[in-house]
Image (cartoon, coloured by chain):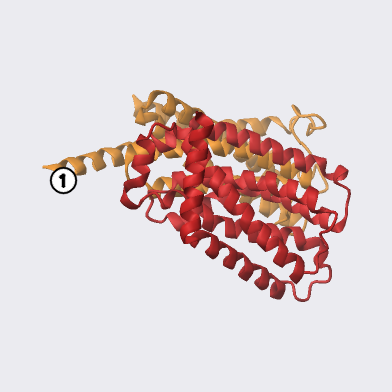
Chain colours: A red, B orange
Amino acid sequence: MYLRQIWTIAAKDLRSEMRTKEALNASVAFSMVILILFSFAFDQAEDLKGLLGGLLWLAYAFAGALVLNRSFARELQNDCLDALISSPAPPSAIFLGKALANFALLMAVELISLGVFAILYDVRLSGKLGLLSLVMLLATWGITVIGTTFSALTVNLTMRELMLPVLIYPFLIPVLMSAMILTTDLIAGVPIATNLVWLRVLVAFDIAFTAVTVLYIDVVLVG
Amino acid sequence: MRQTILFLLAAVFAGILLWNGATILDLPQQVTNVGAYKIIYFHVPAAFTAFTGFVTALVASILYLATGKLRYDAFAAGVTEVALAFATANLISGMIWARYAWGIWWTWDARLTSMLVCLLMYYGYVMLRQAITEPTQRARLSAFMSILGCINVAFVYQSIAWYRTQHPSPVLGFREGGGMGPGLETPMYWNWLAMLCLATILASVRMRQGEFATEIDSLRRQAHSH
């Protein structure tokens, strides 16, 4: 029952996004622009290989904020948010459903950008895709949980679009840092065994923040 | 009553500062090979005071969510703002020392970075509070953010410590490998006490302002509804 409620919310969000594609298009375009701008920023850099993970995750983090901003804001029209909250689905199901939809959208944006990134920066991904997608899944879930929480937190603010990035990036530092280190090393061909500690940080972050937000999200949504 | 306590605290603060300041001035000039070491007597207690404040704010936030009394919210807000001020003092005094000792103002070291991230996060908390006008909504959301923030401090601190560190290893006796030499450590704890007194006074004043602001706000609402 609970799982079906989550799925209903997630499917609703994905369906409405697929009809307009406004967040998806904007986000993909934005991450392309960032990736191109980076090429000028590091034009003279001697050793670009050491920066690749950082570049990729910065682009993901910036583009992700666009998707996350829309998550709860799209429910404001016609008071849909109130309708959602008064529906039989518990707040945590609404939150998890929205998080799941955001997760799918972010992964889509990231996969598209990864392809473009690999072409533009001459990155060979064959044989590394398995571990890289593990890192992407874990880190993206961390970004999604924090992002969706703060999307709910800031939904009624007038400066919503500005507040969300300012609030989430300091929170995302452990996730982004781990993901950047892991990605850079994976691309450079360093064995994952030397970096297990960062995988653990990602897993611990995901578990801790998912647990806390699922427990307390009704404070934010209902009060 | 409240006034008396505040004046007493102020007297204690001033007393300790004068007496302890004299002790610190009398300490030998160069116990280590690094000049300007005496700044540590303000640097370390400021960090302690800041963290005491953040933890107190966490407790007050949990209490607010449990009881729903706006008093706890005003307390959490006041304490967080004061803790932010002490965290800033800690960073700035550290930077001044670093300029002498390392020759640079800033380095991306574990403690410096985690303190800066901490500062940015709680600055976000203050910004969030300013952006919400409805008092109970503001209280709920900022209490929630304070809890998330405290969990994140642990993550930030631990992960950045694994990343890199340059900061002097623990100097205080209660940590392994610490210990500053006879008579050098006690003034630090006295300064901490003095700063706690000052922080209590500031937080109390700030809390009072917060309560007045809420009161004025509700009066304004009443006036509008008539």
At 74% from the left and 46% from the top, the residue drawn is: A134
A176 sits to left or right of A146: right
How many numbered marks appear?
A: 1
Element type at marker 1?
helix
Determine the image quadrant of residue A204.
top right
Residue B129: x and y, percent? Answer: 41, 45
| Residue plotted at (72% across, 59% down) | A54
Q: Position of residue A61 (x, y in %)?
A: 62, 56
Provide the residue designation for mark 1.
Answer: B224
Q: Residue at x 57, y 30 (%)?
A: B193
- Residue B69: x and y in percent read 36, 27
Give the answer, above or below, for where B35 lies relative to B15.
below
Residue B136 coordinates in the image, percent (x, y): 34, 36
Q: Residue at x 76, y 69 (%)?
A: A119
Q: Is residue A125 visible?
A: yes
Q: Would you say B35 lies left or right of B84 here?
A: right
Toward the left, the furthest residue is: B226
Please say whether residue B88 is visible from this viewpoint. no
Say which chain tag 1 marks: B
Task: Give the crowd class for mark 1: few <14, some 14-19, many >=20 residues within 10 Å.
Answer: few
Q: Nearer the viewer, residue B137 or A76?
A: A76
In the rendered image, the vertical position of residue A162 relative to residue A95, given as above or below: below
Q: Nearer the viewer, residue B92 or B156?
A: B156
Name the image quarter holding the C terminus of chain A: top left
A155 vs A107, nearest the viewer: A107
Residue type pointed to by label 1: His
B99 vs B139, left or right, is right
Q: Nearer the viewer, residue A185 or B88?
A: A185
